Image (spheres, grey):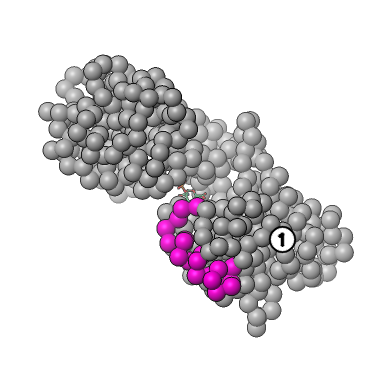
């Protein structure tokens, strides 16, 4: 990458990370070519539009496309820097599937030239960046690859994970610190020069394996801590305690900071990435594996308690509040709330309504159940039993007076002022008197 000229950049994979990254790099003045396997995605972006929801992304993409800085295509073009941001799912045995990374690497390898930089951003098991390098070396014996030559290599290969929060992606892509792991220190320095073009946070160089593990560890750390909170909530239910009160008080300790229980852990990262560690070191990771189990079990605990409540109130109309995997976003994939609501809809049919301000219609699995999508005002007017599954601001702001007389199962602890049910039949429930 010459210092006097901004590099041409190819971003492979235009999803929740790739597209915002491509747009931000383009905003920094680089010419960016986005690549995706979906013709629909490519056409949408070339029109200056977006296929995903993210705060302020539409205006940014529209701006860089209209200035000619961002274009999209199905094929990987020549470039100076290649950023790979494709999915790394796991299979039914929780084994990571890096086939999309390798497929992207194959198309990059075909167009690589001396001086190019290949950066993997996808969350990946330890060793994936080296596997990518090995594959490039095999396909391109004409190029000296880092770590495999005693001479100055022709290309650089690095791993640089993102750590952005959905809903704050553009802000966090720019401001968060980043770990930049090179196959060699020289690779890390080359990648660092690229990230310095658009990252304001501190960029810290390391080796590729440490950077891969760091990404997995961040999400496993969160998963373990949420599991602790979820386990406390299940224990509190058994003992007839209010878990929110217990956590509120415990967190007054200067060195205690317990996270929030919920209906389980959703999204595509925290519930997935810990398995990459467990798969690499199964004997050595009992805590991480157990935490995954606790968080998955919490969904079934919530379903069982909600089921009990709906049956205990046979005349009640029921509103499930929220489908998203967390507050104030429109992402319903891998959402515990959605699973809970859909299970109740299948069991209780038209007694169940769903409030989700971020949805225009109910997802497909609700078809034929009789459940309806209603707004929050209708729920407050017509439903006697409220099951809070997502802590959207619009639910949080409903005053006690509007919840009076209703039975509430609040899995997110948003209505601390709701008086508790007097009897211990369904402990932890709150009821307005
Ligand atoms: N959750 C709880 N209790 C809490 C916090 C979260 O039940 O106290 C639940 C949420 O409701 C949600 C799930 O956990 O269902 C995950 O939500 P989140 O906001 O904790 O995280 P994500 O999945 O949106 O984003 C995470 C972030 N990782 C960390 O905070 C360590 C983000 O920085 C990563 O970039 C992202 O994963 C990713 O792409 O890996």
Q: Position of residue 282 (x, y in %)?
A: 63, 34
Q: Which quarter of the figure is the C terminus placed in?
A: top left
- Ligand 1 within 8 Å of the CB at mark 1: no
Q: Going 65% across and 74% down the picture, which residue do you hit?
A: 7
Q: Position of residue 162 (x, y in %)?
A: 54, 56
**Secondary element at image label 1:** loop
Please, which residue is most extreme toward the bottom here?
Answer: 4
Residue 114 placement: quadrant: bottom right
Image position of 144 (left or right of 292):
right
Q: Which residue is disc 1 drawn over? A: 76
Query: What range is drawn magenta here?
Result: 52-70
Residue 426 placement: quadrant: top left
Which residue is nearer to you in this view: 67 or 166?
67
Q: Position of residue 330 (x, y in %)?
A: 41, 46
Image position of 151 (left or right of 302):
right
**Looking at the image, residue 242 lies above or below residue 59:** above
Q: Position of residue 211 (x, y in %)?
A: 61, 55
Residue 324 placement: quadrant: top left
């Amino acid at each position: 990458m010459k210092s006097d000229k901004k590099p041409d950049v190819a971003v492979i994979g235009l999803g929740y990370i790739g597209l915002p990254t491509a747009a931000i790099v383009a905003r920094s003045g680089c010419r960016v070519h986005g690549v995706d396997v979906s013709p629909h995605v490519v056409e949408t972006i070339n029109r200056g539009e977006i296929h995903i929801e993210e705060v302020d992304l539409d205006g940014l993409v529209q701006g860089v496309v209209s200035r000619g800085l961002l274009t999209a295509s199905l094929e990987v073009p020549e470039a100076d820097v290649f950023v790979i941001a494709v999915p790394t799912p796991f299979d039914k045995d929780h084994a990571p599937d890096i086939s999309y990374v390798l497929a992207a690497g194959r198309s990059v390898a075909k167009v690589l030239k001396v001086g190019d930089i290949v950066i993997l951003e996808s969350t990946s098991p330890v060793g994936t960046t080296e596997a990518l390098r090995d594959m490039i070396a095999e396909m391109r014996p004409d190029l000296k690859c880092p770590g495999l030559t005693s001479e100055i290599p022709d290309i650089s290969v690095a791993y640089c994970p993102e750590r952005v929060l959905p809903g704050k992606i553009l802000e966090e892509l720019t401001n968060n610190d980043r770990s930049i792991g090179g196959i060699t220190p020289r690779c890390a320095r080359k990648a660092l020069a690229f990230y310095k073009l658009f990252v304001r946070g501190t960029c810290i160089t390391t080796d590729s394996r440490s950077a891969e593990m760091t990404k997995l560890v961040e999400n496993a750390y969160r998963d373990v801590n949420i599991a602790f909170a979820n386990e406390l909530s299940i224990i509190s239910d058994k003992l007839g305690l209010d878990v929110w009160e217990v956590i509120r008080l415990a967190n007054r300790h200067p060195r205690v900071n317990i996270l929030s229980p919920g209906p389980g852990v959703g999204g595509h990262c925290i519930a997935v990435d810990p398995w990459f560690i467990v798969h690499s070191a199964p004997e050595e990771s009992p805590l991480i594996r157990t935490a995954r189990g606790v968080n998955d079990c919490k969904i079934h605990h919530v379903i069982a308690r909600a089921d009990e409540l709906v049956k205990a109130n046979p005349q009640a109309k029921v509103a499930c509040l929220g489908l998203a995997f967390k507050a104030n976003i429109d992402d319903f994939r891998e959402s515990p709330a959605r699973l809970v609501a859909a299970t109740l809809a299948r069991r209780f049919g038209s007694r169940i309504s769903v409030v989700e301000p971020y949805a225009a219609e109910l997802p497909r699995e609700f078809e034929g159940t009789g459940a309806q999508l209603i707004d929050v005002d209708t729920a407050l007017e017509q439903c006697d039993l409220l099951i809070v599954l997502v802590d959207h601001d619009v639910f949080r702001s409903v005053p006690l007076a509007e919840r009076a007389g209703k039975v509430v199962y609040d899995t997110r602890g948003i209505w601390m002022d709701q008086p508790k049910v007097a009897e211990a039949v369904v402990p932890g429930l709150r009821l307005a008197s």
